[in-house]
Image: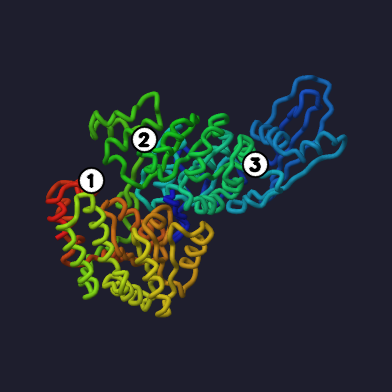
Amino acid sequence: MGGDRGRTPRVGTPVPVTTERCCEQPVPAGMSALRHVPAMKRAYVRPWPDSDVVLAQLAHRGERGFLSIRYEQRTDTAVPSGDRRLAAAVRDLIANDAAVARRMRGLREGTLEWTFNCAPGHERDYDRALRRVVPLLLPRRVQDSLYPFQRSGTCFLLQRNRAVLADDMGLGKTVQVIAAIRRLYRARRLRTCLVAAPRTLIANWDAEFRRWAPELTVLGLDRFGGDFADSDWCRAAARAHAVLASYEDVRDLWRHLARQPPSLIVADEAHRLRKSDSQLSQAMRRLVTPRLWMLTGTPVERDAADLACLLSLLEPRLYSIDDDRFGLETMRARARPYLLRRTKDSVLPELPTAVEHIVECEMLPTQRAAYDEAVRSLSSSSPGDFLALFGRLRSICDWEPVSGDSAKLDRAGDLVQAAAARGRKTVVFSFTIDPLRQLSERLRRSGIGCQLLIGEQSLEARERAIAKFKSDPECVALAASMRVGSEGLTLTEATQVIFINRWWNPSANAQAVDRVVRIGQTQPVDVHYLTCANTVEDRLQPMLDRKSLTFDELIDRLRHDRQLAADLLH
């Protein structure tokens, strides 16, 4: 979702709870869902073929729930009927908890009892033995503060076993999925769930589940280490409602998952599956599951090949990865039953806009000298060196490593300090790491609080950096790599975004900006793109437009086209 890592729409003015018919009937205003629950429910279960019948009773007193089970002597062989959700909960409780099963086998007289909290927002308060079955003990209705468009998205998912939720980044895709999962468990329509996401987003999914579905138990598959066995997945699925796994884990684990597939697989940042020949895409293709929901904030409907690949993963019996031959318009029409995409403008017109600024920086003398020297080497370079030279020139624009001079870092530092003086925070993005390290060090020497967020950090170090940036008033800057910082994070504490450099893919840059411009943002956001005048940077975009090339196509031609290299690099 997650998100996008998923936003928490509770920021700001609470949204009245309204419910669409496809999800559930609305709860009257001012009335707790507990009032709709009968005072006492009963169910009869025979836990083992040779055992007596167990009587289960479920009562609600105020906001507390009470479950009791005891044996009941009966002369008839037929098990009487009772509440089906309660019966299912008791069967699962005895089957999946060895301690409860032992107590039941040794129980001759007396009653086993447990308590739990039914109040919305406090559902995590329950006896540990009930953790796997508590959704069936809570009221079937779910109360949560979703925006109307999020409730509509939740219903879209509930109505489909296969779906692509492709909302704009920042609209809470993670929240919508968790709301749907929560309802499936309450309705006894889900047994196991696997959420596959980039490793950097696993902690966010865990936090969002705790916030939006506190009664559900969540377990990260990384707790089992890297060497998985069939028993690891089975044990995780038996203990948790949602198992979180990185795509790297799924790639290595698919054989075990295939033997006992989850009831639902959620694929976050599903645009990572667009390459049909990748190991990850092939591993996902081998998994057969009753439900598959994909999340992506990247507008995949703009590319026929991307759509064809995702549809072939959703419905392999109906679609092929070669279906892009039918053209984009045909693929869009075929995707329509499975794909839901809403933009911020259409559902949240009140969301503050991002004001973009192109900031031209004049290279410092040492930078310009290094740049010009690199350009002069073009005449003696072979075609195979053009791409390396292109990368070197872009690197010098960011930072000259010998002298440490950088007009961009000077300007970025000024922007950060000016924003800090007004009580504003800044996120600085770069697709290369060295400029981020240099900027971070410069800011710290100036007494400006800054955190670094890069891929080589451990997951725990990244989480600490993000938490400090979000919670510490003295930490006013986050220097983040595009690879790590542009997916799944919610950084609405910032109101300024700076790109030291940018990837020449508009959706990648937009994805980074949407970390800040999303639900929860109440202030206008300034976005600054730093560029060096009279360099490859200010020639690149006009050349892409003039030649009708994508960035990837230009890079491919740059490997062998001397004239193109001369036009771009001189």
Q: Report the mark closest to the observer, 1 or 3.
A: 1
**Residue 137, picture quadrant:** top right
Residue pointed to by mark 3: 239
Does residue 306 show up? yes
- Residue density around tag 1, few if under 14, some if 14–19, many if 20 or more, within 10 Å: few
* Depth check, front residue: 321 or 369: 369
**Secondary element type, mark 1:** helix
Q: Which residue: 42% across, 50% down?
A: 4
Tell me the distance, in whole angstroms, between the alpha carbons under discs 2 and 3.
Answer: 33 Å
Give the number of the disc on residue 276. Answer: 2
For residue 164, above or below residue 384: above
Residue 193: x and y in percent read 54, 38
Q: In this view, does 486 lie to the left or right of 213?
A: left
**Badge 1 amino acid:** Asp
Q: Earlier in the sequence, mark 1 or mark 2?
A: 2
**Secondary element type, mark 2:** loop
Give the number of the disc on residue 556. Answer: 1
Q: Report the mark closest to the observer, 2 or 3.
A: 2
Residue 499: x and y in percent read 30, 63
Give the number of the disc on residue 272. Answer: none
**Residue contact at pointers 1 and 3, CB within 8 angstroms:** no
Q: Is residue 449 left or right of residue 429?
A: right
Tell me the distance, in whole angstroms, between the alpha carbons under discs 1 and 2.
Answer: 20 Å
Most distant residue in the front direction: 380
Q: Report the mark closest to the observer, 1 or 2.
A: 1
Q: Earlier in the sequence, mark 2 or mark 3?
A: 3
**Secondary element type, mark 3:** helix
**Badge 2 amino acid:** Ser
For residue 209, above or below residue 53: below
